[in-house]
Amino acid sequence: MGSIFLSIIREYVKLNIQSLRGGYRGNSVNAMKITVSDKAHNWYIDEMGLEKGDGVRFFGKVYGKTEVHDNFSVGINVGTPTDPLATETIDGITYFIEKSDEWFFKGYDFQIEYNDEMKEVSYHFKKQ
């Protein structure tokens, strides 16, 4: 368990250092985008009881795996953006990533789709 934890911490530190070196891109041409499919949007409404004015935050969390990360996965919670890196608003619901989570999403556009076979959303990282 100790070596796995150290490996995760090393990866987290490496990603944060890379993010700090690159700095925030703001509204530049390479600014990341969030795309939420209609089916995924409806799934969030049904599963999380979302209403107009709500927000869904995406962030990197320890443990798990994505298409581009080992030992990290996508976390979500309901909230309000305070310092957003990227947003997508559909029917009054804002999907967002905070600037403090840029280390996890840097260099990628983030796509959320609904997987009909799995009956849940799936996350995709598309290189910018």
Image (cartoon, rainbow, N blue to C red):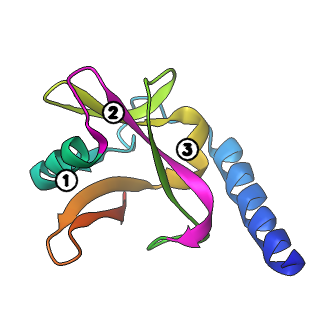
Distance of mark 1 from mark 2, alpha carbons?
Answer: 15 Å
* Mark 1 or 2: the one toward you: 1
SS label for mark 2 = strand
Dot 2 and dot 3 residues touching (CB under 8 Å): no
Tell me, yes or no, whether the two marked residues, 1 and 3, touch with CB atoms within 8 Å: no
Q: Which residues are magenta?
A: 48-65
Q: Position of residue 10 (x, y in %)?
A: 80, 66
Quadrant the N terminus occupies: bottom right
Q: Which mark is residue 102?
A: 3
Q: Quadrant of residue 91?
A: top left
> Would residue 60 be counted in the magenta stretch?
yes
Q: Residues within 10 Å of mark 2 (few under 14, many from 20)?
A: some
Callout 1: helix, strand or loop? helix
Q: Quadrant of residue 14?
A: bottom right
Q: Is residue 57 left or right of residue 2?
A: left
Distance CA(mark 2)–CA(mark 3): 13 Å
Q: Residue drawn at (79%, 63%), measured in percent from left and top?
A: 9
Q: Is residue 65 left or right of residue 39?
A: right
Question: How packed is label 3: few (under 14 Cα within 10 Å), some, or many (20 or more)?
Answer: many
- Mark toward the start of the polypeptide (1 vs 3): 1
Mark carried by residue 87: 2
| Image position, residue 116 (x, y; %) | 14, 71
* CB-based contact (under 8 Å), mark 1 and mark 2: no
Residue 106 seen anywhere in this rendered image of the structure: no
Q: Amino acid at mark 3?
A: Glu
Query: Which residue is located at x 41 percent, y 56 percent?
Result: 108
**Label 1 sits on residue:** 40
Q: Amino acid at mark 1?
A: Ala
Q: Position of residue 8 (x, y in %)?
A: 75, 68
Query: Mark 1, mark 3: which one is toward the viewer?
Result: 1
